[in-house]
Amino acid sequence: ILQIHKINKNSFSIYNDRIIPLKQLKIISDAYNIDILRTSQQALNNKINTKTALINLKKAQKQIIVSWTEYLNTYLTPEEQKLVDQAEKIKFKADSISNCIIENLKPEKNNQDQEHLKYLVENELYPCIETLTKNLHELVEIQTEVAFNLKAASEDIFERIVVLSIFVSLLILVIVWLIIRIGKMGILVREQADDLSVYNEELTCANEELKI
């Protein structure tokens, strides 16, 4: 029962602490690379208007906050926690740059800081998100590695349960066979005892007849 409980616990951990975090980390990575970096580049190159850019950037920031918070509420291994601590510092910088870009894109700025926007996007935001993406990728690899180890542990436990079940089944069969065997021997002994008793009685009668 304890072994089965371990398998259930491992399955629960694989889903809640590894599979779901994979989805959360992908959402965060896409939000930075697509919704923030690409949107900023498109705004810089006038491929989208500032209103659309601002909507996309603010939406991405909210999504990052939600997904990152959810991810931090899962179980983190010691190695994972170190990477998370590093990611927190890079995230803070990336979020600060994003806020500066949002400020720069506001209508009242009227594109007066276009050079500053270009510097923020190309020299600040891009390298920062590139570093953050590498960090997030390492976190994804940890999810995969831990999930694989938990799966392997569950398979090992399952194999032991199967072996134990087979052993117990064979043991039960042996015990049943012994019980049946002993029962048959008991019947045989009783039959032999009855035969011996009859023989003794017949022998006694014969002796008495000889005396007469």
Image (cartoon, rainbow, N blue to C red):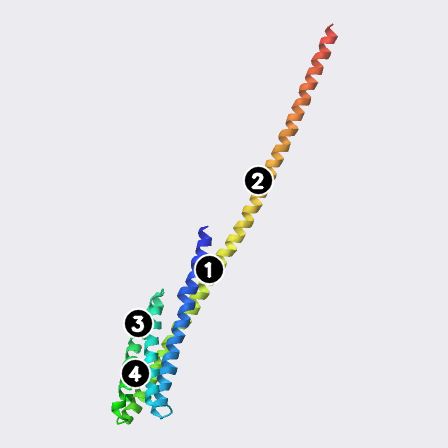
Residue displayed at 35% across by 76% down: 63
| Residue of label 4 | 98
* Secondary structure category for the residue under label 1: helix
| Residue of label 3 | 85
- Does residue 128 lie above or below 22 as drawn? below
* Secondary structure category for the residue under label 3: helix
Q: Amino acid at mark 1?
A: Ala
User: Considering depth in this image, is 38 or 87 the residue closer to the camera?
Assistant: 38
- Which of the two labelled residues, at mark 1 and mark 4, occupies the earlier sequence position? 4
Q: Nearer the viewer, mark 4 or mark 3?
A: 4
Q: Nearer the viewer, mark 4 or mark 2?
A: 4
Q: Amino acid at mark 4?
A: Ser
* Residue contact between numbered discs 3 and 2, judged by CB atoms under 8 Å: no
Residue 114 placed where, x, y %?
A: 29, 93
| Residue of label 1 | 153
- Does residue 9 lie above or below 20 as drawn? above
| Residue of label 2 | 175
Residue 137 visible in the displayed image: no
Q: CA distance from mark 4 to mark 3?
A: 20 Å
User: Considering depth in this image, is 91 or 107 the residue closer to the camera?
Assistant: 107
Residue 122 placed where, x, y %?
A: 33, 89
Residue 127 placed where, x, y %?
A: 34, 84
- Which of the two labelled residues, at mark 4 and mark 3, occupies the earlier sequence position? 3
Residue 28 visible in the displayed image: yes
Q: CA distance from mark 4 to mark 2?
A: 74 Å
